[in-house]
Image: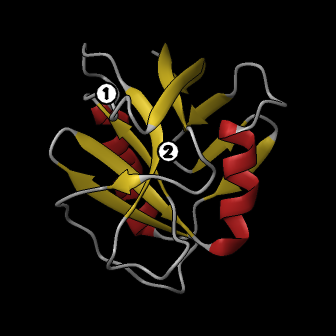
Amino acid sequence: MALNRLIKRYSAYYSGWCVAFGEHKVVYDENKDINWLHGESQVGFALAPKLKKILVRELLSRHVDIPEITLADAYVKINDKHYEFQTEDDAREMKLLKGFFKTPDEIHMFLTCHFCYPPGTKIVTFSTKKPLIIMYKEIKPLRLIVI
């Protein structure tokens, strides 16, 4: 049974600004395209530079009215961009992410960063807590489909 829900989406008031992801668990490998992070009441993925520009544009730019993410066991699709997972770790992490989205709480999406990753690393963050309103403004929602 597919899950279909709207996620509140936020953009920083100033390009490049973001808050820290906070305490989390991760196994970071700079050679991977996606590194998965798990924190209290939030999950996220740090993107390799080759994916960052594409996905940030797809998720946070104004050229897409209401972006759509589809999560499946073997892939993620963002609008018309399709990314197949490369490792068993990705498939395991996707299962955890899909479980997170089953919460009845509102979910918020915004970009964060963290000092322990290379400069410029952005983390697409999903949280049950709203981001700081002084840093982020709410924009149109995101459609999430979990299959």
In the image, 58: left or right of 73? right
The percent position of residue 79, horizontal first and vertical second, equals 76, 34
Q: Which residue is mark 1?
A: 130
Identify the residue at image location x=51%, y=30%. 10
**Mark nearer the viewer, 2 or 1:** 1
For residue 90, which quarter of the picture? bottom left
Q: Which residue is mark 2?
A: 73
Q: Amino acid at mark 1?
A: Lys
Residue 52 position (above or below residue 59): below
| Residue 3 visible in rendering | no
Identify the residue at image location x=47%, y=21%. 7
In the image, 18: left or right of 63? left
Identify the residue at image location x=80%, y=28%. 64
Which residue is at the front of the view, 141 or 134?
134
For residue 133, which quarter of the picture? top left
Which residue is at the front of the view, 15 or 49?
15
For residue 48, which quarter of the picture? bottom right
Residue 76 position (above or below residue 17): above
What is the basis of the colouring in this image? secondary structure
Which residue is at the front of the view, 2 or 100?
100
Q: Amino acid at mark 2?
A: Asp
* Tag 1 secondary structure: loop
Identify the residue at image location x=25%, y=13%. 104
In the image, 145: left or right of 133? right
The percent position of residue 46, horizontal first and vertical second, equals 47, 63
Which residue is at the front of the view, 121 or 75?
121
